[in-house]
Image: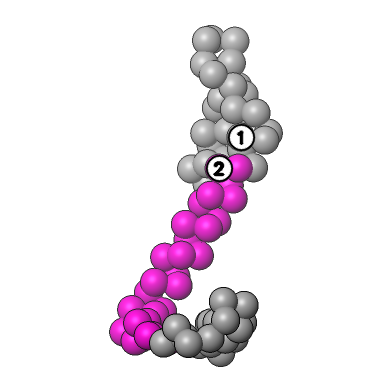
């Protein structure tokens, strides 16, 4: 899953003396996390492709905090 990123990281460390910009371990971990989230969102999108994701909740008559609590609970229930 991370083969290309691993190869890029190793090459940046290997060829740093030749003028290549070295990827720091922090940059590597950030890039790895970004790949992880991209894959997770792609899977989420594929799984939910045919699901009805539009929900309209009319909470205009409630207090803001009550509305937020209801919305959060509906999101958790839907997930």
Count of number-bearing discs: 2
Residue at image location 52% in from the left, 10% down from the top:
19
Tell me the tag on residue 9.
Answer: none
| Residue 16, image quadrant | top right
Circles 1 and 2 in contact, beta carbons < 8 Å? yes
Q: Which of the pair 11/58 is nearer the observer?
A: 58
Q: Is residue 45 above or below residue 26?
A: below
Q: Position of residue 70 (x, y in %)?
A: 57, 86
**How many residues crowd around disc 1 within 10 Å: few (fewer than 14), some, or many (20 or more)?**
few
Q: What residue would you read off at disc 1?
A: 27
Q: Is residue 69 above or below residue 31?
A: below
**Magenta segment boundaries in residue numbering:** 30-57
| Residue 5 rendering spot, x and y as whole percentages | 52, 41
Is residue 76 in sight in this rendering? no
The residue that appears at 58% across and 47% down in the rendered structure is 32
Could one spot residue 39 in this view of the protein? yes
Q: Which residue does the numbered mark 2 point to in the structure image?
A: 31
């Amino acid at each position: 899953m991370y083969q290309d990123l691993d190869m890029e990281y190793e090459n940046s460390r290997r060829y740093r003396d030749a003028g290549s910009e070295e990827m720091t371990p922090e940059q590597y971990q950030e890039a790895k996390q970004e790949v992880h989230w991209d894959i997770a969102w792609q899977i989420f999108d594929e799984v939910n492709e045919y699901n009805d994701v539009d929900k309209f909740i009319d909470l205009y008559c409630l207090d803001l905090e009550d509305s937020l609590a209801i919305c959060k609970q509906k999101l958790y229930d839907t997930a």
